Image (cartoon, grey):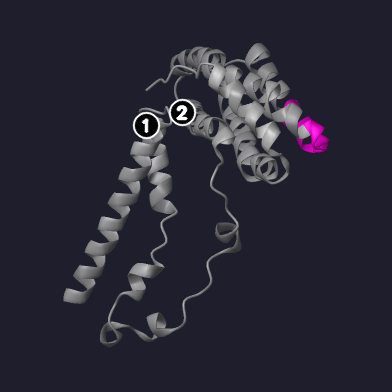
Amino acid sequence: MTDRVELAERIKSACLQAASAAYEQAGISGLCGEGRWELAVQAIKALDLAPLLETRTPETRTPETQRPASPRPEARRGSMQRIEPLRRLSSEHHTGLVIARRARELARKAPDAREAAWADLRQRFADELEPHFKLEERGLLPALQAAGEGVLVERTLAEHLRMRAMIDAGGPEDLAAFAEALADHIRFEEKELFGVAQRVLGADALERIQALHDREAAPVCRA
């Protein structure tokens, strides 16, 4: 029982450290409120507990834990830390996921609440999402187009256009659909677009993107 308590304490400590570090880093990156907590929760979910389990003594290991450790998933081995010219865009994606989650939750509320939620979503689109789209369209996407990644660029622009149209012509009944479109778009950019950018863009292109980001003020952080 003592060994189990010690293991539980180590796991709890590791989770708290991961969440705290992610929360602080999110604040440094410009997120606040829900965005910082979202990143902290994601850090706990991504925590690798295998090293903690391997620290148990041979006498307390079960046959299961005595087996050789399974290799980590390929997706995790191949994951990349965001390079500096993409960190702002990636940080703003966390805010976008918070917006999507809130819209998805409010889509199930009463009609009056949905009306207010749609008005708030339209404002947040104008204040936070539209500037993000334009920043990509002025920096990252032209660089990828020049690098021969036209298919990815066309998909990105098409999804930007679709979400702009939803905001312009939609209403409270579209909260859930917009939330889904936004979340899917962010996952595409994080898993595909940014990964390709880090592989194919040269130093000059990345410097131009960074210079653009340095000149442009970041959207105002909302709790």
Residue visible at 41% across and 29% down in the picture: 31
Q: Secondary structure at mark 1?
A: helix
Comparing 191 with 176, the one in front is 191
Q: Which residues are magenta?
A: 145-157
Q: Quadrant of residue 157?
A: top right
User: Which residue is depicted at the point 30% across and 44% down?
Assistant: 20
Q: Residue at x 79, y 32 (%)?
A: 145
Q: Is residue 75 magenta?
A: no
Q: Residue furthest left?
A: 2
Q: Residues within 10 Å of mark 1 (few under 14, many from 20)?
A: some
Residue 42: x and y, percent?
43, 46
Decide if residue 180 is in sight here. Answer: yes
Residue holding disc 2: 102
Amino acid type at image mark 1: Gly
- Is the C terminus in the top left, top right, bottom left or bottom right quadrant? top left
| Residue position for label 1 | 27
Q: Residues within 10 Å of mark 2 (few under 14, many from 20)?
A: some
Which of the two marks, 2 or 1, is nearer to us in this view?
1
